[in-house]
Image (cartoon, helix red, strand yellow):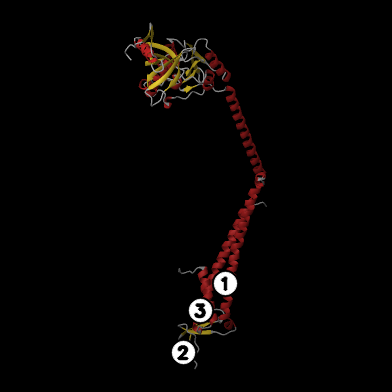
Amino acid sequence: MSDEPTFEQARDELEQIVRKLEDGNTTLDEAIGLWERGEQLHALCRAQLDQAEARVAELLRRMDAAEKPAGDG
Amino acid sequence: MSAKPVPISYGDRRVFSVSGFNQGIAWYLKRLPAVWVEGEIAELRRNDRWGLVFIVLKDTDGRSTLSATMTRQRFDALEPPPQVGERVHALGRSEIWERRGELRLTVIKLERFGVGMLLQQIEVLRARLAAEGLFAPDRKRPLPFLPRTIGLVCGSDAAAKRDVVETAEARYPPARFRVMEVPVQGAGAPARIAGALRLLDADPQVDVIVVARGGGSVEDLLAFSDELVCRAVAASTTPVVSAIGHEQDNPLVDLVADVRAGTPSLAAKLIVPDHAAETARLDTLLARAGRALEGNTARSRRLLELLASRPAFRSPETWISVRRERLHNAAEGLRRAAPDRVQREALRLRHDHDRLRLLGPAATLERGYAIVQDAAGAVLRDAAAVAPSDDIGVRLGRGGLRATVTEVRE
């Protein structure tokens, strides 16, 4: 695993954390640590998602630009 | 019965007994020399159990007959066995059969005469040539389909020539002949026939040779059983068709020839194709080929028309537009897919985050509470757990603080 986890790895870990917290078998110290890690993972995922969204939007814009002159109008 | 018989005397009449008479005649006959008798075999009786063969000879006019005997041993030595109806020369002595008083010829030597003799000679030659392999089937060469020139050996002004030429020309008008007219009977005939054969064989234009002769007696056809002629036919590199006499005649040249035609006109049918029949066959074939081609073309045309009438052919833009549409749909899918995925992930992430916040202390902290942790990160519940100047962390609703303890209240 590299320093930066992939989106899926980060999201899976986030979901594991959520499940652990829901079980309620954790000490407060552990829960706070997990919560802190969860927030961190969320921020990571959010950033990657935003990045992906931006790339998709850019691609779509370029596709539209390429299609317009050749299209049937 | 060598003794001369003695008569009984009745007065001055001298009388002989029957046997005495017969003996007397026999005695006289014995003094005659052996003579040659020419006749036709009218009857022939031969039996394996008998020592003698009984023969009746007659003149060809049939008016006189003569009984004859021959030892079976002598008779059986004759090859082929003489038959009733054959003309023979018999050398024999006159004898009387004493018990019956019948005169007969005791034959010492029997020879075929005339046709019989000729047939015998031919038979001997046939056996000799057969032994040499001159009649072997593998010597037979096929006739050409269409000879450039037909060599014809025949008698001068012969009906056989007319038969061959006319029949051949009727079947195949452009037929070309090289005719060698030669004597076909008589002493010099075989050499002349053989010479004509060699001449025609040497002609490169001649692709087939016909040896033709109309009907005739065995003697008339003799030249065509001659060794000279047979050998000339065997030596010919050009295929030879024999057409001698009638269907029932079998001169030796028939056996040596590559093809035997029963008659001259049959020979003509063998050497040239029937022009009219061949032309008709060609016409039929050509017509069939034409129809087949026509059928093919029509079928191909229908197929082509069918293809051309398909929408793809009638309006080529359709198959472009179909593809464009498909591409467009794919692009649409793609365009939808990527944002959808992002959206889905975002939704899922928000959901996860909501749950995280619900479970975590975030809501509590937002109401103004704070969590205090020691330098190791343990949550502080008791003020006694820290001392002045210890570093502590404070977690708030939004963000946190790093602080130093200045006072501890118990």
Q: Residue at x 53, y 83 (%)?
A: A24
Check disc 3 and report the residue beneath it.
A34
Q: Return the residue nearer the eye: B76 or B352.
A: B76
Check disc 2 and report the residue beneath it.
B385
Question: Distance from label 1 to label 3 (Cα)?
Answer: 16 Å
Q: Which dot, 3 or 2, sits closer to the camera?
A: 3
Residue B190 visible: no
Residue B6 lies in quadrant: top left
Q: Amino acid at mark 1?
A: Leu
Check disc 1 and report the residue beneath it.
B349
Residue B336 lies in quadrant: bottom right
Q: Is residue B131 above or below residue B20?
A: below
Residue B70 lies in quadrant: top left
Q: Is residue B343 above or below residue B31?
A: below
Q: Amino acid at mark 2?
A: Ala
Q: Return the residue nearer the eye: B335 or B128.
A: B128
Direction from residue B329 to residue B61 in the image, left or right: left
Tell which circle, 2 or 1, labels the residue nearer the N-terminal end.
1
Q: Which chain does the numbered disc 1 sit on?
A: B
